[in-house]
Amino acid sequence: YCSPILIKLPNKKILVTMMEKAICGFDVKTGQLLWEFEHINDTSVHPNIPVFINGYLYCTSGYGKGGVMLKLANDGNSVTEVWRNTELDSKTGGVVVLNGRIYGSGDRNRKIFCLDWQTGKQLFSSKEMAPATLIANDGLLYIYSESGKIFLVEPKTDGFNILSSFPVPFGADPHWAHLVIKDKKLYVRHGTSLMVYELAAN
């Protein structure tokens, strides 16, 4: 279920994705498996796109598994574990990284979490909006809760400041789609319904 990411190193390009039982890195030119890091949960479902920043790779999965931070070797041929955090076990929402912090929604741990990128330490959390999918834009979080509400949230030093919210008026079935922002418009899909909202100017 996982969309891969492309990591460009000075001497090679690596494709990284999450497979049934492992996080894997492949040499784009040759197709060779360079490394794999075991990552297993109850369902073998790992849909969240990995995040790579300055040599570090973060991957997380739902169903209680949680996430792991890996350090990619300079040549791209291996990884080593830096830290683990089982609290942020995102099932379908993925994560965003802002100002050295990871934001995401737990699955079995039904909270919105803020983790420190370097240490994996939980800085704070909130039950109010979880579980959810989320994206970031202009330093703010747009959170689409499974309860059927959209939240505009300012991440503060020690918590979440909800600026506004509104219910999703159309559609059916679970609220699992990812929000999209383009050209100052917010796109919200719920089942077969698509809604578009103008974003207010700053």
Image (cartoon, helix red, strand yellow):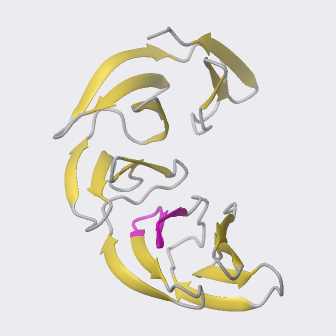
In x, y percent, where is residue 178? 60, 38
* Quarter of the rendering occupied by the N terminus: bottom right
In x, y percent, where is residue 78? 54, 90
Q: Nearer the viewer, residue 96 or 46?
A: 96
* Quarter of the rendering occupied by the C terminus: top left
Residue 55 is one of the magenta-drawn residues: yes
Residue at x-position 22% and y-position 63%: 121
Residue 184 versus residue 93 in the image, above or below: above
Residue 63 is one of the magenta-drawn residues: yes
Residue at x-position 76% and y-position 26%: 192
Magenta residues span 51-67
Image position of 128 (left or right of 167): left
| Rendering quarter of residue 120 | bottom left
Q: Nearer the viewer, residue 130 or 16?
A: 16
User: Which residue sits furthest right?
Assistant: 30
Residue at x-position 64% and y-position 77%: 10
Q: Main secondary structure of the magenta part?
A: strand
